[in-house]
Amino acid sequence: MDSYGGSVLRVDLTEGTSVRHPTEEELARSFLGGRGLNVKRLWDELPAHTDALSPENALIFGAGPLVGTLFPGGARFNVTAMSPHTGILGDSNAGGFFGPELKFAGYDQLIVQCKSDHPVYLWIRDDQVEIRDARGLWGRDTWETTLSIQEDLGDPDTQVATVGQAAENGVTFAGIFVNLNRAVGRTGMGTVMAAKNLKAIAIRGTGLIPVADMARFQEIIERLDAVIYQHPEYEQRVRLGTTKLMRALNAIGALPTRHFQQGQFEHAEDVSGETIERLYKTKSKACFACTIPCSRFLVVDDPRFPGLCLEGPEYEPLAGFTARVGNSDLALALKCVDLANRYGMDAITLSEAISWAMECHQRGMLSPEESNGLDLTWGNGDAILSLVHKIAHREGLGDLLADGVKSAAQRLGKGSEQIAMEGKGLEVFQADPRAIKAYGLGNAVASRGADHLRSEPWFEFSNDPEEGIRRFGIPETAFRLESRGKGLVVKHFEEMAAIADSLGVCKNTYNNMEVLSWTETADLLQAATGWDFTGDEVQAIGERIVNLERLFIAREGITRRDDALPSRFLKEPMPAGSGPSTGSVLELEAMLDEYYLARGWETDTGLPTSDKLRELGLPAGD
Amino acid sequence: MPWYLRHGTLEFSAAIGGCDTAAPRTAAWGLRSSMRSLPDACHTPGLMPTKGIVVRDELCTGCRACQVACVAGHDGLFGVFTARLRIIKNESLGLDHPQVCRSCGRAPCMASCVTKALYRDDTTSAVLLRAEVCDSCTACVEACPFGMVALHPDTGLPLICDLCGGEPACVRRCPTGAISYGDLLAESERPPAMHLVTPNLASSRPRLGEDG
């Protein structure tokens, strides 16, 4: 199969065996690869209500057809399993160099099943698969593990995906890390990996991947590169990456300041992407074959944190350890990001856990004993750092927070449930949904719990009503504070996000910069795979994936009433001090009606209709 | 040990200064100067090409687009393994060192070739291969002091940079100008694009294909 690795590798950790079978062409045509093929596999093979931490859970790594190609940033691989953090679909992805290496080794999917009786790591070189003892690596952080495996194998080009101590300690939101700083962060995929006693996966691939029409593919990529180089966002993305959002979101009053109690942060400039660039950036860094090197290597000269250097951070962890916790100390925030990477935790959830504890402290919901004597005043750097360590090791208050805020609030009570900023058990990202309403709706309906990366409906920032009419027939869709039409916007961008994740490309370019239309995507896929696609068919694949994910979470009991967000976003207008967003609330119910209608789902249950499922070739259940 | 492992070994990286474990910024950037010098055996002033590939480590993002372009151009496939250039990376220090064929003035690969399969291209100064007379003896692999020659795993023929006939695909795809092709002196003085410059970017002193 052109532009595919060609095989699926299954590893049984209980038996210590592995088998390989060809990637099924009809599945690839219907779900492409990566996220789409992963969720299809999980839906087919995992019984309903599987305990996420049991050996029965399957941990699936998948890389789509554009991974490892000339596509700029065709680097992303997805990891999918039942989530121990949310109890529903777990799925997250990362860039870097692991995904391409998986493809070069000949694999589109790697499925890890069962559980080893002692810590092991997987060593895959092309078709050789070895399960190796990792007792000496258990207890090591992600950096130590990666470097130690590369040194053992004598090959720094070996790509390593590993978990840190947080996963070993059962923190439910632990991630899997590649290239030291790149996180498969959300929904606790690292926790699943550690529960299988699998410390790391090391891969080296020496293969080359065939392509249906190289000349045509190169021609499209050259045009695509030109679009990227001339894109108005190009230079800023190279300079700042996503940290450009610190200034931008502060200006519109959407920063989650002090746990969403304000939309602007008085110290935003001190912790902005521009300040990081000026003080600490030493060079631009990139994922595999990417022509927009949006990552940055930082060397932080600060006597309190000797030797601190890291790649990144993205906007999400940066805002999480600054505005969200009221912290204006940039070096300290970067130290927190570094610790999150090394312990191996989802920085979004981690920052929500800490900022939730701080608001509980502000409202007198945490007694001094419950907060372990920590002074959880907004911006107290010592307390923030201390909590990062405590959560990773599940000590004291950290033990409460290590299951995420939904569970922590249920245990603490005292009304703290009202301020747990999560949806379906997953913590809300670093922007106030009241100020960017399509994102708000996207968070409420996202299949893996509250998250922006399932849709990235950037169009509401465009302020171009005519384009709104052209695209969606509704001028309000182009404005972030309007509700009307956002159901259509979210549907469209959910399908784009599903396609990006299933092809294995980056949503910064594919969604936010819109470098390829549906038709151009179909052309590129045709050049890569040789299969005929139209633009509409590509979009239908996106729709099929979104619907299958809905079926998956519906099987776990999710309905419309779970497509919810915390009451603060729905009832409390954005307070003064939120700039142009002051006074705004999220009119979620009306937006949900519109969204289900656009999806062809039942508005009372939020579930796909049998007609819609049949149209998409999915099991209709009747 | 198979060549592809030797290609990437830590010892090899350390030997050319690619994988120092010391952390401080100055020391890390200081590595670059130690990578410049060419063994006398390869350097004959009169034979030094005036055109070539200029490398600037500090602009390299480590993305490997150059390698993908090289393999796409030569093999018509997607991959990096048979690329005629590579990047030695140190992720913990954020260092990336593109390694390219120097098209040496007195090329040890050519000198070692008993079947005369390797010859000099008059226009580009690249070392080219007459595949039909090559017997895959690996002498050129052993001879290259930079470890830049390897045998293709399928064809058994040496992978030596042919400069794509004067329009290197790797340079064409490089998004930052970390590798550029042209007059060595002119290219080495070309300033980097403004969006790549930060106050902390190490001095953009270039590394020439030959020395410098």
Image: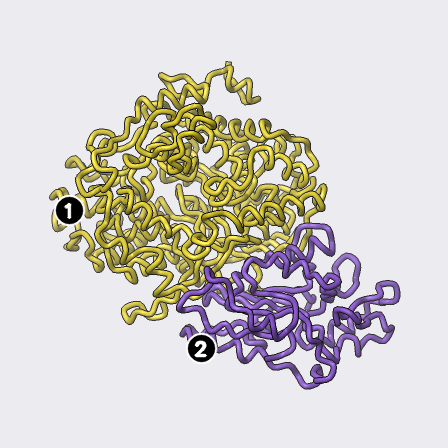
Q: Quadrant of residue B212?
A: bottom right
Q: Colour of chain A?
A: yellow
Task: Specify few, some or many for label 1: CA neighbours under 10 Å numbering under 14, 14-19, or 20 or more.
Answer: many
Measured from the top left, where is residue A78 in percent x and y?
A: 50, 43
- Relative placement, left or right, of A53 versus A259 is right
**Mark nearer the viewer, 2 or 1:** 2
| Camera-side residue of A195 and A543 | A543
| Camera-side residue of B149 and A584 | A584
A33 in relation to B120, above or below? above
The answer for how far apart the CA atoms under marks 2 and 1 are is 45 Å
Name the mark on residue B27: 2
- Relative placement, left or right, of A352 versus B195 is left
Which residue sits furthest top? Answer: A622
Q: Colour of chain B?
A: purple
| Camera-side residue of A344 and A290 | A290
Q: Residue at x 64, y 81 (%)?
A: B38
User: Which amino acid is tagged 2?
Assistant: Ala
Q: Name the residue that disc number 1 marks.
A: A361
Measured from the top left, where is residue A241 in percent x and y?
A: 42, 53
Subunit that carries the residue with mark 1: A
Secondary structure at badge 1 equals helix
Q: Tell me if residue A506 can be seen.
A: yes
